[in-house]
């Protein structure tokens, strides 16, 4: 057997699943507002309800690992988008329950939601780690293999902590969409060799890096949690950058061949203190940063 075939055989014997590290638990809530019922209330009652909700949301939007943000959605898919970053699913559920106990919730209808966890894929580290362990004679799935992998993941979690546990960026605009990697009969991302997936993801990531400073991207994994495989949040002060970035990525092989996309949601950030203003029909300004 020649060297190339030996390398292929070794690669085929190694795990196909890339390593990942996870951080914040994330929930997106898309909401429709019952404007007719709201306008039927007297102005005093509207102010009371808005003030109660604004006070709760102001507490929830404080920067840190446990943070929420409010966006006014554009288009017919809803009126509000609430984004929650928390340390685990129980805290996400607690955020839901807190909101559902507000008087304002009687005027809100959840049209859809999305549950995920901030995820960083480690394609390059995975390939190096798997090869290193194989050279040491360790078998995939053994206790020794799992311990060695966990040591690598622990180092990565510490090094990448700021990206795994981010604050919600204060940008004025948000674009959120879910996506999959195709796995049909003819085109199947999950049947590509890891080295090829690593190459394509590297090229894909280089496009995003060209937009650094203009847009902040947070990827969250949702396999086993929701209907798609990943959720993508893009934050920017200028919404046109969403179109430019996503359009450029359409020509990249990993998107052009292997990507499938769900619905897109675009919203304008609303400070919780301006909720009453929003419900009165005016879009409040963000505080100067």
Image (cartoon, helix red, strand yellow):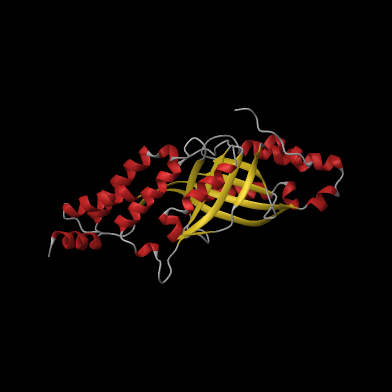
Residue 288: x and y in percent read 63, 27
Of the 4 image quadrants, the one containing the N terminus is bottom left
Foreground pick, 215 / 46: 215
* Vertical position of residue 17 compared to residue 283: above or below: below
Q: Residue furthest top?
A: 288
Relative vertical location of residue 204 with respect to residue 54 in this rendering, above or below: below
Left or right of 8, for residue 75 = right
Residue 19: % across, % down: 34, 52
View extreme (bottom): residue: 185
Q: Where does the C terminus fall, quadrant-wise?
A: top right
State the count of labels. 0
Residue 12 occupies quadrant: bottom left
Q: Is residue 78 left or right of residue 231?
A: right
Q: Position of residue 165 (x, y in %)?
A: 46, 40
In this rendered view, identify the residue nearer to me: 185 or 136. Answer: 185
275 vs 163, left or right, is right
- Residue 181 is at least partly visible in this image: yes
Residue under the image location 75 percent in, 41 percent down = 50
Q: Position of residue 113 (x, y in %)?
A: 60, 55
Whether residue 121 can be seen here: no
Instruction: In this rendered view, identify the residue nearer to me: 227 or 55.
Output: 227
Residue at the left extreme, as displayed: 1
User: In terms of image quadrants, where is residue 14?
Assistant: bottom left
Whether 133 is drawn above or below 6: the answer is above
Give the residue at x 55% y 45%. Answer: 242
**Which residue is painted at 28% across and 45% down in the image?**
151
């Amino acid at each position: 057997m020649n060297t190339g075939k030996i390398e292929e055989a070794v690669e085929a014997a190694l795990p196909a699943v890339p390593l990942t590290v996870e951080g914040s638990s994330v929930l997106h809530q898309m909401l429709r507002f019952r404007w007719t019922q709201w306008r039927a209330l007297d102005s005093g009652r509207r102010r009371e309800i808005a003030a109660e909700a604004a006070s709760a949301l102001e507490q929830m939007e404080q920067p840190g690992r446990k943070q929420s943000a409010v966006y006014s959605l554009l288009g017919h898919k809803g009126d509000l988008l609430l984004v929650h970053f928390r340390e685990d699913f129980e805290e996400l559920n607690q955020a839901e329950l807190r909101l559902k106990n507000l008087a304002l919730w009687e005027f809100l209808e959840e049209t859809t939601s999305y549950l995920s966890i901030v995820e960083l894929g480690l394609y390059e580290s995975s390939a190096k780690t798997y090869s290193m362990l194989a050279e040491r004679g360790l078998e995939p799935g053994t206790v020794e293999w799992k311990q060695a992998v966990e040591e690598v993941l622990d180092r990565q979690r510490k090094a990448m902590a700021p990206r795994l546990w981010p604050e919600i960026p204060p940008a004025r605009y948000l674009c959120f969409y879910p996506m999959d990697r195709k796995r049909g009969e003819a085109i199947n991302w999950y049947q590509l060799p890891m080295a090829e997936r690593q190459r394509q993801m590297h090229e894909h990531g280089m496009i995003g890096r060209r937009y650094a400073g203009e847009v902040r991207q947070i990827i969250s994994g949702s396999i086993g949690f929701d209907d798609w495989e990943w959720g993508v949040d893009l934050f920017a002060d200028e919404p046109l950058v969403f179109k430019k970035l996503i359009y450029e990525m359409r020509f990249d092989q990993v998107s052009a061949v292997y990507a499938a996309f769900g619905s897109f949601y675009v919203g304008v950030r609303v400070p919780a203190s301006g909720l009453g203003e929003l419900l009165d029909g005016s879009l409040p300004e963000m505080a100067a940063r």
